Amino acid sequence: MKDIVKEFPGVRALDGVSLTLEAGEFHSLVGENGAGKSTLMKVLSGVYPHGTYSGEILIDDRVREFRGVRDSETAGVSIIFQELSLVKELTVGENIFLGREPSRFGIIDWSELYHRASQLLQDLRLDIDPRVPVGNLGIGRQQLVEIAKALSQSARILVLDEPTAALTESEVEILFDILRRLKERGVGMIYISHKLDEVFEMSDRITVLRDGRTVGTHEAADLTKDKVIALMVGREVGDIFPVSEHKMGETVLEVRGLTAYSQDVAGKKLVNDVSFSVRKGEVVGIAGLMGAGRTELLTTIFGAWQGKHSGEVLIDGRPVSINSPAEAIRQGIGFVTEDRKRYGLILEQTILDNMTLAALKRISGNFLTSPARENAAVAGPMASLRVKANSPMTVAGTLSGGNQQKVVLGKWLLTEPKVLFLDEPTRGIDVGAKQEIYAEINKLAKEGLAIVLVSSELPEVLGLSDRLIVLHEGRKTGEFSRAEATPEKVMAAATGSA
Protein backbone atom coordinates (compact mmCIF):
# COMPACT_ATOMS: atom_id res chain seq x y z
CA MET A 1 0.00 0.00 0.00
CA LYS A 2 1.55 3.31 -1.12
CA ASP A 3 0.72 6.84 0.08
CA ILE A 4 -2.89 6.06 1.02
CA VAL A 5 -4.97 9.16 1.78
CA LYS A 6 -8.54 8.79 3.02
CA GLU A 7 -10.72 11.73 4.03
CA PHE A 8 -14.08 12.02 5.74
CA PRO A 9 -15.98 15.32 6.10
CA GLY A 10 -13.69 17.56 8.13
CA VAL A 11 -11.22 14.76 8.95
CA ARG A 12 -8.18 13.32 7.14
CA ALA A 13 -8.18 9.79 8.60
CA LEU A 14 -5.17 8.60 6.55
CA ASP A 15 -2.46 10.99 5.44
CA GLY A 16 -0.02 9.26 3.08
CA VAL A 17 0.19 5.89 4.86
CA SER A 18 2.38 3.16 3.34
CA LEU A 19 2.61 -0.51 4.34
CA THR A 20 4.32 -3.57 2.86
CA LEU A 21 3.67 -7.25 3.57
CA GLU A 22 5.71 -10.26 2.49
CA ALA A 23 4.53 -13.82 1.96
CA GLY A 24 4.64 -15.78 5.20
CA GLU A 25 5.14 -12.63 7.27
CA PHE A 26 3.36 -11.72 10.52
CA HIS A 27 3.16 -7.93 10.41
CA SER A 28 1.56 -6.09 13.34
CA LEU A 29 -0.13 -2.72 12.89
CA VAL A 30 -0.33 -0.72 16.12
CA GLY A 31 -1.38 2.75 17.19
CA GLU A 32 -3.79 4.58 19.43
CA ASN A 33 -7.51 4.43 18.71
CA GLY A 34 -8.17 6.88 15.91
CA ALA A 35 -4.67 6.42 14.47
CA GLY A 36 -6.14 5.00 11.24
CA LYS A 37 -5.46 1.25 11.57
CA SER A 38 -8.97 -0.01 10.83
CA THR A 39 -9.52 2.65 8.15
CA LEU A 40 -6.38 1.48 6.33
CA MET A 41 -7.56 -2.12 6.44
CA LYS A 42 -11.01 -1.12 5.14
CA VAL A 43 -9.23 0.41 2.15
CA LEU A 44 -7.30 -2.83 1.60
CA SER A 45 -10.42 -4.98 1.93
CA GLY A 46 -12.58 -2.95 -0.45
CA VAL A 47 -14.97 -1.66 2.21
CA TYR A 48 -13.82 1.76 1.02
CA PRO A 49 -13.72 1.18 -2.75
CA HIS A 50 -11.29 2.60 -5.28
CA GLY A 51 -12.10 6.23 -5.99
CA THR A 52 -12.94 7.08 -2.38
CA TYR A 53 -9.24 7.36 -1.49
CA SER A 54 -5.95 8.22 -3.18
CA GLY A 55 -2.81 6.12 -3.35
CA GLU A 56 -2.09 2.64 -4.69
CA ILE A 57 -2.62 -0.97 -3.64
CA LEU A 58 -0.22 -3.44 -5.26
CA ILE A 59 -0.40 -7.23 -4.96
CA ASP A 60 2.39 -9.18 -6.65
CA ASP A 61 3.64 -5.84 -8.06
CA ARG A 62 0.35 -5.32 -9.86
CA VAL A 63 -1.86 -2.30 -9.11
CA ARG A 64 -5.29 -3.36 -7.86
CA GLU A 65 -8.47 -1.27 -7.86
CA PHE A 66 -11.09 -2.88 -5.65
CA ARG A 67 -14.69 -1.80 -6.29
CA GLY A 68 -15.90 -3.73 -3.26
CA VAL A 69 -15.20 -6.51 -0.77
CA ARG A 70 -15.75 -9.25 -3.36
CA ASP A 71 -12.97 -7.84 -5.57
CA SER A 72 -10.61 -7.82 -2.60
CA GLU A 73 -11.48 -11.41 -1.69
CA THR A 74 -10.94 -12.52 -5.30
CA ALA A 75 -7.45 -11.01 -5.09
CA GLY A 76 -6.74 -13.16 -2.02
CA VAL A 77 -7.40 -10.64 0.76
CA SER A 78 -9.55 -11.67 3.70
CA ILE A 79 -10.26 -9.51 6.75
CA ILE A 80 -11.67 -10.46 10.13
CA PHE A 81 -13.17 -7.40 11.76
CA GLN A 82 -13.53 -6.78 15.48
CA GLU A 83 -17.32 -7.07 15.09
CA LEU A 84 -18.02 -10.57 13.79
CA SER A 85 -19.97 -10.96 10.55
CA LEU A 86 -21.56 -14.31 11.34
CA VAL A 87 -25.29 -15.09 11.06
CA LYS A 88 -26.03 -16.69 14.43
CA GLU A 89 -29.19 -18.48 13.24
CA LEU A 90 -27.22 -20.39 10.58
CA THR A 91 -24.96 -23.37 11.23
CA VAL A 92 -21.17 -23.21 11.32
CA GLY A 93 -20.94 -24.78 7.86
CA GLU A 94 -23.54 -22.43 6.37
CA ASN A 95 -21.63 -19.44 7.75
CA ILE A 96 -18.28 -20.63 6.40
CA PHE A 97 -19.61 -20.93 2.84
CA LEU A 98 -22.29 -18.21 2.95
CA GLY A 99 -22.72 -16.84 -0.57
CA ARG A 100 -20.33 -19.49 -1.95
CA GLU A 101 -22.33 -22.67 -1.27
CA PRO A 102 -21.38 -25.71 -3.40
CA SER A 103 -24.28 -26.62 -5.66
CA ARG A 104 -25.42 -29.12 -8.26
CA PHE A 105 -27.85 -28.08 -10.99
CA GLY A 106 -28.55 -24.86 -9.10
CA ILE A 107 -29.38 -26.61 -5.82
CA ILE A 108 -27.16 -26.37 -2.73
CA ASP A 109 -25.26 -29.61 -2.15
CA TRP A 110 -25.59 -29.81 1.64
CA SER A 111 -23.59 -33.01 1.92
CA GLU A 112 -20.64 -31.43 0.09
CA LEU A 113 -20.96 -28.20 2.09
CA TYR A 114 -20.71 -29.96 5.45
CA HIS A 115 -17.98 -32.29 4.16
CA ARG A 116 -15.84 -29.31 3.13
CA ALA A 117 -16.59 -27.47 6.38
CA SER A 118 -15.64 -30.54 8.41
CA GLN A 119 -12.37 -30.94 6.50
CA LEU A 120 -11.51 -27.27 6.99
CA LEU A 121 -12.22 -27.38 10.74
CA GLN A 122 -10.17 -30.59 11.09
CA ASP A 123 -7.31 -29.00 9.14
CA LEU A 124 -7.36 -26.11 11.63
CA ARG A 125 -7.62 -28.61 14.51
CA LEU A 126 -10.87 -27.05 15.70
CA ASP A 127 -13.20 -29.42 17.53
CA ILE A 128 -16.40 -27.76 16.30
CA ASP A 129 -19.45 -29.51 14.77
CA PRO A 130 -20.17 -27.80 11.41
CA ARG A 131 -23.91 -28.55 11.81
CA VAL A 132 -24.27 -26.61 15.10
CA PRO A 133 -25.88 -23.15 14.90
CA VAL A 134 -23.23 -20.48 15.42
CA GLY A 135 -25.41 -18.83 18.07
CA ASN A 136 -24.95 -21.92 20.27
CA LEU A 137 -21.18 -21.30 20.45
CA GLY A 138 -19.41 -18.98 22.86
CA ILE A 139 -18.00 -15.75 21.48
CA GLY A 140 -14.47 -17.16 21.51
CA ARG A 141 -15.37 -20.14 19.33
CA GLN A 142 -17.40 -17.87 17.06
CA GLN A 143 -14.18 -15.92 16.50
CA LEU A 144 -12.42 -19.15 15.46
CA VAL A 145 -15.29 -19.93 13.05
CA GLU A 146 -14.81 -16.45 11.54
CA ILE A 147 -11.16 -17.32 10.92
CA ALA A 148 -12.14 -20.65 9.34
CA LYS A 149 -14.55 -18.75 7.08
CA ALA A 150 -11.76 -16.43 5.96
CA LEU A 151 -9.41 -19.31 5.23
CA SER A 152 -12.07 -21.15 3.21
CA GLN A 153 -11.59 -18.41 0.61
CA SER A 154 -7.93 -19.43 0.11
CA ALA A 155 -6.73 -16.10 1.44
CA ARG A 156 -3.11 -15.17 0.73
CA ILE A 157 -3.37 -12.01 2.83
CA LEU A 158 -5.18 -12.37 6.16
CA VAL A 159 -6.04 -9.29 8.22
CA LEU A 160 -7.00 -9.79 11.88
CA ASP A 161 -8.46 -6.82 13.78
CA GLU A 162 -8.31 -7.41 17.57
CA PRO A 163 -9.00 -11.16 17.13
CA THR A 164 -8.26 -12.14 20.76
CA ALA A 165 -10.45 -9.52 22.50
CA ALA A 166 -13.07 -12.12 23.42
CA LEU A 167 -10.89 -15.25 23.59
CA THR A 168 -9.81 -17.19 26.66
CA GLU A 169 -6.11 -17.98 27.13
CA SER A 170 -6.58 -21.50 25.77
CA GLU A 171 -8.44 -20.17 22.72
CA VAL A 172 -5.67 -17.64 22.12
CA GLU A 173 -3.16 -20.50 22.06
CA ILE A 174 -5.33 -22.35 19.54
CA LEU A 175 -5.49 -19.22 17.39
CA PHE A 176 -1.74 -18.62 17.53
CA ASP A 177 -1.06 -22.24 16.65
CA ILE A 178 -3.28 -21.80 13.56
CA LEU A 179 -1.51 -18.57 12.61
CA ARG A 180 1.96 -20.17 12.94
CA ARG A 181 0.91 -22.93 10.55
CA LEU A 182 -0.49 -20.36 8.12
CA LYS A 183 2.88 -18.58 8.15
CA GLU A 184 4.55 -21.84 7.17
CA ARG A 185 2.15 -22.06 4.21
CA GLY A 186 3.16 -18.59 3.04
CA VAL A 187 0.07 -16.66 4.14
CA GLY A 188 0.94 -13.03 4.92
CA MET A 189 -0.86 -11.65 7.98
CA ILE A 190 -1.58 -8.12 9.18
CA TYR A 191 -2.39 -8.17 12.87
CA ILE A 192 -4.06 -5.28 14.72
CA SER A 193 -3.97 -5.47 18.51
CA HIS A 194 -3.59 -3.31 21.60
CA LYS A 195 -2.10 -6.30 23.45
CA LEU A 196 1.63 -5.73 23.06
CA ASP A 197 2.51 -9.11 24.62
CA GLU A 198 0.77 -10.78 21.66
CA VAL A 199 2.33 -8.37 19.18
CA PHE A 200 5.84 -9.20 20.34
CA GLU A 201 5.16 -12.94 20.63
CA MET A 202 4.12 -13.28 16.99
CA SER A 203 5.48 -10.36 14.93
CA ASP A 204 8.23 -10.30 12.35
CA ARG A 205 7.78 -6.57 11.77
CA ILE A 206 5.74 -3.83 13.46
CA THR A 207 4.32 -0.70 11.81
CA VAL A 208 3.22 2.17 14.04
CA LEU A 209 0.55 4.67 13.00
CA ARG A 210 -0.15 7.97 14.75
CA ASP A 211 -2.78 10.54 13.76
CA GLY A 212 -3.29 8.93 10.35
CA ARG A 213 0.41 8.87 9.44
CA THR A 214 3.07 6.17 9.34
CA VAL A 215 5.51 6.74 12.21
CA GLY A 216 7.72 3.88 11.10
CA THR A 217 8.15 0.18 10.36
CA HIS A 218 10.69 -1.79 12.42
CA GLU A 219 11.85 -5.33 12.93
CA ALA A 220 10.13 -6.59 16.07
CA ALA A 221 13.49 -7.71 17.47
CA ASP A 222 14.72 -4.11 17.37
CA LEU A 223 11.87 -2.77 19.53
CA THR A 224 10.69 -2.97 23.14
CA LYS A 225 7.22 -2.37 24.53
CA ASP A 226 8.27 1.01 25.90
CA LYS A 227 9.65 2.05 22.50
CA VAL A 228 6.42 1.01 20.75
CA ILE A 229 4.29 2.90 23.29
CA ALA A 230 6.46 6.00 22.89
CA LEU A 231 6.04 5.79 19.09
CA MET A 232 2.27 5.32 19.44
CA VAL A 233 1.62 8.23 21.77
CA GLY A 234 4.44 10.52 20.64
CA ARG A 235 6.01 10.76 24.06
CA GLU A 236 7.91 8.65 26.53
CA VAL A 237 5.62 6.77 28.89
CA GLY A 238 6.54 6.45 32.57
CA ASP A 239 4.63 4.45 35.13
CA ILE A 240 1.42 3.17 33.58
CA PHE A 241 -0.66 3.19 36.75
CA PRO A 242 -1.04 6.32 38.91
CA VAL A 243 0.14 6.21 42.52
CA SER A 244 -2.81 5.54 44.83
CA GLU A 245 -3.36 8.19 47.49
CA HIS A 246 -6.97 7.48 48.35
CA LYS A 247 -8.42 8.58 51.71
CA MET A 248 -11.17 6.11 52.44
CA GLY A 249 -14.30 6.95 54.37
CA GLU A 250 -17.39 5.12 55.53
CA THR A 251 -18.86 2.10 53.75
CA VAL A 252 -21.06 3.13 50.81
CA LEU A 253 -22.04 -0.26 49.34
CA GLU A 254 -22.35 -3.57 51.17
CA VAL A 255 -23.38 -6.84 49.53
CA ARG A 256 -24.36 -9.83 51.67
CA GLY A 257 -24.73 -13.41 50.44
CA LEU A 258 -25.53 -12.55 46.83
CA THR A 259 -26.48 -15.53 44.67
CA ALA A 260 -27.53 -15.40 41.01
CA TYR A 261 -28.85 -18.37 39.03
CA SER A 262 -28.40 -19.18 35.36
CA GLN A 263 -31.25 -18.23 33.07
CA ASP A 264 -30.56 -21.27 30.87
CA VAL A 265 -29.56 -24.11 33.22
CA ALA A 266 -31.97 -24.75 36.08
CA GLY A 267 -30.33 -24.63 39.50
CA LYS A 268 -26.90 -23.53 38.24
CA LYS A 269 -25.39 -20.76 40.37
CA LEU A 270 -23.36 -18.22 38.41
CA VAL A 271 -22.75 -16.19 41.59
CA ASN A 272 -22.63 -18.21 44.78
CA ASP A 273 -23.04 -16.53 48.19
CA VAL A 274 -20.72 -13.57 47.54
CA SER A 275 -20.29 -10.81 50.12
CA PHE A 276 -18.14 -7.68 49.93
CA SER A 277 -18.19 -3.96 50.71
CA VAL A 278 -16.80 -0.75 49.21
CA ARG A 279 -15.90 2.41 51.11
CA LYS A 280 -15.98 6.00 50.01
CA GLY A 281 -12.79 6.77 48.07
CA GLU A 282 -11.87 3.09 47.63
CA VAL A 283 -11.24 1.10 44.45
CA VAL A 284 -12.22 -2.54 44.95
CA GLY A 285 -11.04 -4.79 42.12
CA ILE A 286 -12.82 -8.01 41.18
CA ALA A 287 -10.56 -10.53 39.46
CA GLY A 288 -11.22 -13.97 38.04
CA LEU A 289 -11.03 -15.96 34.85
CA MET A 290 -13.70 -15.95 32.17
CA GLY A 291 -16.90 -17.46 33.55
CA ALA A 292 -16.01 -16.64 37.17
CA GLY A 293 -19.22 -14.63 37.61
CA ARG A 294 -17.77 -11.11 37.74
CA THR A 295 -20.15 -9.46 35.27
CA GLU A 296 -23.11 -11.42 36.63
CA LEU A 297 -22.31 -10.14 40.12
CA LEU A 298 -22.39 -6.48 39.04
CA THR A 299 -25.42 -6.97 36.78
CA THR A 300 -27.40 -8.52 39.64
CA ILE A 301 -26.57 -5.70 42.08
CA PHE A 302 -27.55 -3.19 39.37
CA GLY A 303 -30.98 -4.81 38.99
CA ALA A 304 -30.40 -5.92 35.40
CA TRP A 305 -30.09 -9.70 35.95
CA GLN A 306 -33.14 -11.43 34.49
CA GLY A 307 -32.67 -14.74 36.29
CA LYS A 308 -33.48 -15.76 39.85
CA HIS A 309 -31.30 -14.21 42.54
CA SER A 310 -31.10 -13.68 46.27
CA GLY A 311 -29.07 -11.76 48.82
CA GLU A 312 -29.02 -8.33 50.41
CA VAL A 313 -27.69 -4.96 49.18
CA LEU A 314 -27.12 -1.99 51.49
CA ILE A 315 -26.40 1.62 50.45
CA ASP A 316 -25.00 3.85 53.20
CA GLY A 317 -25.89 1.12 55.71
CA ARG A 318 -29.54 1.01 54.63
CA PRO A 319 -31.05 -2.11 52.97
CA VAL A 320 -32.39 -1.33 49.51
CA SER A 321 -34.44 -3.28 46.99
CA ILE A 322 -33.06 -2.89 43.47
CA ASN A 323 -35.07 -4.66 40.78
CA SER A 324 -34.24 -2.49 37.77
CA PRO A 325 -31.43 -0.29 36.46
CA ALA A 326 -33.68 2.75 36.97
CA GLU A 327 -33.91 1.94 40.67
CA ALA A 328 -30.13 1.38 40.83
CA ILE A 329 -29.56 4.85 39.34
CA ARG A 330 -31.95 6.37 41.90
CA GLN A 331 -29.96 4.66 44.65
CA GLY A 332 -26.72 6.21 43.35
CA ILE A 333 -25.14 3.37 41.34
CA GLY A 334 -23.56 3.90 37.91
CA PHE A 335 -22.51 1.03 35.63
CA VAL A 336 -19.98 1.27 32.78
CA THR A 337 -20.80 -2.06 31.12
CA GLU A 338 -18.45 -4.52 29.43
CA ASP A 339 -20.00 -4.07 25.96
CA ARG A 340 -20.16 -0.32 25.36
CA LYS A 341 -21.67 -0.62 21.88
CA ARG A 342 -24.52 -2.88 22.97
CA TYR A 343 -25.32 -1.59 26.46
CA GLY A 344 -23.45 1.68 26.91
CA LEU A 345 -24.25 3.81 23.87
CA ILE A 346 -26.87 4.59 21.26
CA LEU A 347 -24.38 4.76 18.42
CA GLU A 348 -26.70 6.68 16.06
CA GLN A 349 -27.19 9.47 18.62
CA THR A 350 -24.91 12.38 19.48
CA ILE A 351 -22.44 12.67 22.33
CA LEU A 352 -24.85 15.10 24.00
CA ASP A 353 -27.80 12.69 23.78
CA ASN A 354 -25.72 9.79 25.09
CA MET A 355 -24.05 11.66 27.94
CA THR A 356 -27.27 13.14 29.30
CA LEU A 357 -29.43 10.04 28.87
CA ALA A 358 -29.13 8.58 32.39
CA ALA A 359 -29.30 11.99 34.14
CA LEU A 360 -31.85 13.73 31.91
CA LYS A 361 -34.40 14.36 34.65
CA ARG A 362 -31.78 15.82 36.98
CA ILE A 363 -30.35 18.05 34.24
CA SER A 364 -33.50 19.26 32.46
CA GLY A 365 -36.31 18.71 34.97
CA ASN A 366 -39.40 16.49 34.98
CA PHE A 367 -41.31 17.65 31.92
CA LEU A 368 -39.27 19.34 29.13
CA THR A 369 -35.68 18.89 28.02
CA SER A 370 -33.44 21.95 28.08
CA PRO A 371 -30.81 21.94 25.31
CA ALA A 372 -28.97 24.81 26.99
CA ARG A 373 -28.72 22.94 30.29
CA GLU A 374 -27.68 19.73 28.53
CA ASN A 375 -24.92 21.51 26.60
CA ALA A 376 -23.67 23.10 29.79
CA ALA A 377 -23.77 19.75 31.61
CA VAL A 378 -21.71 17.81 29.02
CA ALA A 379 -19.07 20.53 28.60
CA GLY A 380 -17.38 19.57 31.88
CA PRO A 381 -17.04 15.79 31.29
CA MET A 382 -16.01 16.31 27.65
CA ALA A 383 -13.19 18.62 28.77
CA SER A 384 -12.04 16.67 31.84
CA LEU A 385 -12.13 13.31 30.01
CA ARG A 386 -10.53 14.88 26.90
CA VAL A 387 -13.10 13.52 24.46
CA LYS A 388 -11.73 14.09 20.95
CA ALA A 389 -14.71 15.41 18.98
CA ASN A 390 -15.60 18.59 17.12
CA SER A 391 -18.67 19.25 19.30
CA PRO A 392 -21.25 17.55 21.57
CA MET A 393 -23.34 17.07 18.42
CA THR A 394 -20.83 14.57 16.99
CA VAL A 395 -22.47 11.16 16.45
CA ALA A 396 -21.13 8.64 18.98
CA GLY A 397 -20.74 5.88 16.39
CA THR A 398 -18.13 7.94 14.50
CA LEU A 399 -15.79 8.14 17.51
CA SER A 400 -12.82 5.86 18.18
CA GLY A 401 -13.23 3.14 20.81
CA GLY A 402 -11.37 5.11 23.46
CA ASN A 403 -13.50 8.21 22.95
CA GLN A 404 -16.69 6.14 22.98
CA GLN A 405 -15.62 4.74 26.34
CA LYS A 406 -15.04 8.26 27.66
CA VAL A 407 -18.57 9.21 26.60
CA VAL A 408 -19.98 6.22 28.51
CA LEU A 409 -17.97 7.18 31.59
CA GLY A 410 -19.12 10.78 31.26
CA LYS A 411 -22.74 9.64 31.06
CA TRP A 412 -22.50 7.95 34.45
CA LEU A 413 -20.55 10.77 36.06
CA LEU A 414 -23.43 13.13 35.19
CA THR A 415 -25.72 11.00 37.40
CA GLU A 416 -23.47 11.95 40.34
CA PRO A 417 -23.24 8.35 41.60
CA LYS A 418 -22.21 7.24 45.08
CA VAL A 419 -20.66 4.05 43.69
CA LEU A 420 -19.46 3.38 40.15
CA PHE A 421 -19.17 -0.09 38.59
CA LEU A 422 -16.51 -0.37 35.88
CA ASP A 423 -16.70 -3.65 33.94
CA GLU A 424 -13.64 -4.02 31.65
CA PRO A 425 -13.37 -0.22 31.25
CA THR A 426 -10.30 -0.37 28.97
CA ARG A 427 -11.23 -3.30 26.74
CA GLY A 428 -10.40 -2.62 23.09
CA ILE A 429 -8.84 0.81 23.65
CA ASP A 430 -5.27 1.90 23.05
CA VAL A 431 -2.54 2.49 25.61
CA GLY A 432 -2.84 6.28 25.51
CA ALA A 433 -6.60 6.22 26.17
CA LYS A 434 -6.02 3.57 28.84
CA GLN A 435 -3.70 5.86 30.77
CA GLU A 436 -6.28 8.64 30.60
CA ILE A 437 -8.95 6.26 31.96
CA TYR A 438 -6.56 5.13 34.73
CA ALA A 439 -5.88 8.74 35.72
CA GLU A 440 -9.63 9.45 35.79
CA ILE A 441 -10.31 6.41 38.01
CA ASN A 442 -7.62 7.58 40.42
CA LYS A 443 -8.98 11.14 40.39
CA LEU A 444 -12.56 9.98 41.06
CA ALA A 445 -11.42 7.83 43.99
CA LYS A 446 -9.48 10.78 45.42
CA GLU A 447 -12.70 12.81 45.22
CA GLY A 448 -14.45 10.19 47.34
CA LEU A 449 -16.28 8.05 44.78
CA ALA A 450 -16.57 4.35 45.67
CA ILE A 451 -15.45 2.27 42.67
CA VAL A 452 -15.83 -1.43 41.84
CA LEU A 453 -13.50 -2.45 39.00
CA VAL A 454 -13.70 -5.67 36.97
CA SER A 455 -10.79 -6.40 34.64
CA SER A 456 -9.42 -9.46 32.87
CA GLU A 457 -5.98 -7.81 32.71
CA LEU A 458 -4.20 -8.81 35.90
CA PRO A 459 -1.66 -5.93 35.86
CA GLU A 460 -4.56 -3.50 35.50
CA VAL A 461 -6.61 -4.80 38.40
CA LEU A 462 -3.48 -5.07 40.58
CA GLY A 463 -2.28 -1.59 39.62
CA LEU A 464 -5.56 0.24 40.26
CA SER A 465 -7.16 -1.54 43.23
CA ASP A 466 -6.88 -0.67 46.92
CA ARG A 467 -8.38 -4.05 47.71
CA LEU A 468 -8.87 -7.10 45.53
CA ILE A 469 -11.60 -9.75 45.56
CA VAL A 470 -11.13 -12.93 43.52
CA LEU A 471 -13.93 -15.11 42.15
CA HIS A 472 -13.75 -18.69 40.91
CA GLU A 473 -16.82 -20.40 39.44
CA GLY A 474 -19.09 -17.90 41.16
CA ARG A 475 -17.52 -18.16 44.60
CA LYS A 476 -15.31 -15.69 46.41
CA THR A 477 -12.00 -17.51 46.78
CA GLY A 478 -9.72 -14.70 47.90
CA GLU A 479 -9.51 -11.16 49.24
CA PHE A 480 -6.26 -9.17 49.35
CA SER A 481 -5.11 -5.70 50.26
CA ARG A 482 -2.96 -3.84 47.74
CA ALA A 483 0.15 -4.84 49.70
CA GLU A 484 -0.86 -8.51 49.90
CA ALA A 485 -1.96 -8.97 46.29
CA THR A 486 0.62 -10.63 44.05
CA PRO A 487 0.04 -12.15 40.60
CA GLU A 488 0.77 -15.62 42.02
CA LYS A 489 -1.72 -15.30 44.89
CA VAL A 490 -4.44 -13.85 42.69
CA MET A 491 -4.01 -16.49 39.99
CA ALA A 492 -4.04 -19.28 42.59
CA ALA A 493 -7.36 -17.97 43.91
CA ALA A 494 -8.75 -17.44 40.39
CA THR A 495 -8.04 -21.06 39.46
CA GLY A 496 -9.44 -22.42 42.72
CA SER A 497 -5.98 -23.52 43.85
CA ALA A 498 -5.61 -21.19 46.84
Image: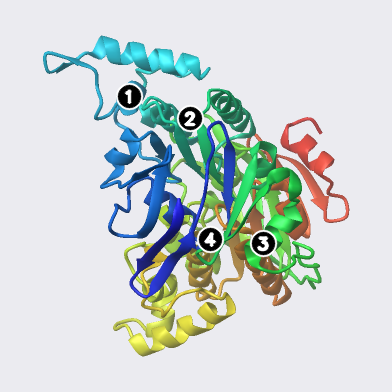
What amino acid is found at the position of numbered circle 1 in the picture? Thr
Question: Looking at numbered disc 2 in the image, what kind of residue is underneath it?
Answer: Leu
CA gap between label 4 and label 2 equals 24 Å
The residue pinned by badge 3 equals: 231
- Within 10 Å of disc 4 (Cα), the crowding (few <14, some 14-19, many 20+) is many
Q: Position of residue 351 (x, y in %)?
A: 41, 73
- Mark 3 or mark 1, which has the lower sequence index? 1
Q: Eyeballing the image, is 75 above or below 186? A: below
**Residue 42 % position (x, y):** 39, 50
Specify few, some or many for label 3: CA neighbours under 10 Å numbering under 14, 14-19, or 20 or more. many
Q: Return the disc, 4 or 1, that comes first in the chain's sequence.
A: 4
Residue at image coords 40%, 14%: 118
Q: Nearer the viewer, mark 4 or mark 1?
A: 4
Q: Residue 374 appears at what percent x and percent y?
A: 40, 83
Marks 3 and 1, Cα distance to the nearest angstrom? 43 Å
Disc number at residue 144?
2
User: Disc 4 and disc 3: Cα gap in Å?
Assistant: 14 Å
- The disc labelled 4 sits on which kind of residue? Asn
Task: Of the two numbered discs 4 and 2 on the same chain, state the one appearing first in sequence.
Answer: 4
